[in-house]
Amino acid sequence: MQLPSALLENAVNELARLPGIGKKTALRLVLHLLRQDESQAQALAQAIVKAKTETQFCNQCFNISDGAECSICANKQRNQQLLCVVENIRDVIAIESTQQFNGLYHVLGGLISPLDGIGPDQLHIETLVQRVEKGEVQELIFAVSPTIQGDTTIYFIQKQLQHTTCKITTIARGIAFGGELEYADEFTLARSLTNRLPVNQYIQ
């Protein structure tokens, strides 16, 4: 793509680094910004910088947060006895959009995948076990992508919690095996949450 300005080309190249944005889309976005007031471009740049430098992770569930505790964990109206385990923050957003879940979350930060060099110690599994061992959690719902890595992670954590009385379930197979949770439509995701199953019926 031949561009008339080195500054324009640099801006396009930087935007094109973002996932899902190609050179044509990046060019369209940059040209749009050039047509706007300078204050709008500055506001966008400042918002991105502040999001990068000032957001942090909740010290309880590891969701993204503006402070030490995220807004979900701080909400005492939510069911404190119901804990949903997800792979990443995008999954929290996906489930919240269904408006079918009123409990708390625990973000693992990934899934166990030996081939990729990801073991249990690299995930937030120990803190999850500690949360359950406190005795406040009555039901643990696994809402991870139905893949080999997801099944391995569920199996490992289930073994760590065998000594507890916590009920362990997983979302129903409305989510196709091999699919990614964040790409599921809201109806399918909501139905999977509603029709969750005991984990011992899910992994044999």
Image (cartoon, rainbow, N blue to C red):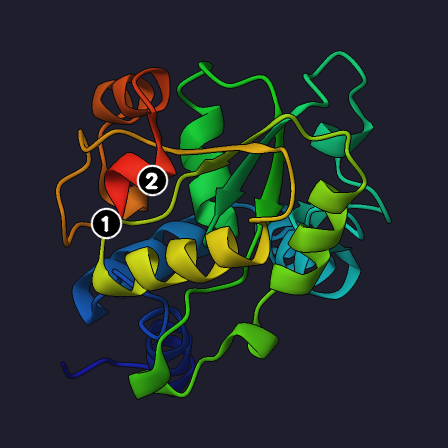
| Front residue (pair 168, 39) | 168
Pointer 2 local density, CA inside 10 Å: few below 14, some 14–19, many at least 20: few
Give residue 131's position: percent from left, percent from top: 74, 45
Residue 41 x/y as whole percent: 57, 54
The answer to whether residue 200 is left or right of residue 134 is left
As drawn, which residue projects farthest toward the right?
68
The x and y percentages for residue 178 are 14, 54
Residue at image mark 1: 204
**Quarter of the figure that contains the N terminus:** bottom left
Is disc 2 placed on a helix, strand or loop? helix
- Residue depicted at x 18% and y 64%: 24
Depth check, front residue: 134 or 175: 134
Report if the CB atoms under discs 2 and 1 are less than 8 Å apart: yes
Q: Which residue is mark 2?
A: 200
- Point out residue 64 in the picture as x, y percentages from the top left corner: 66, 49
Q: Nearer the viewer, residue 43 or 94?
A: 94
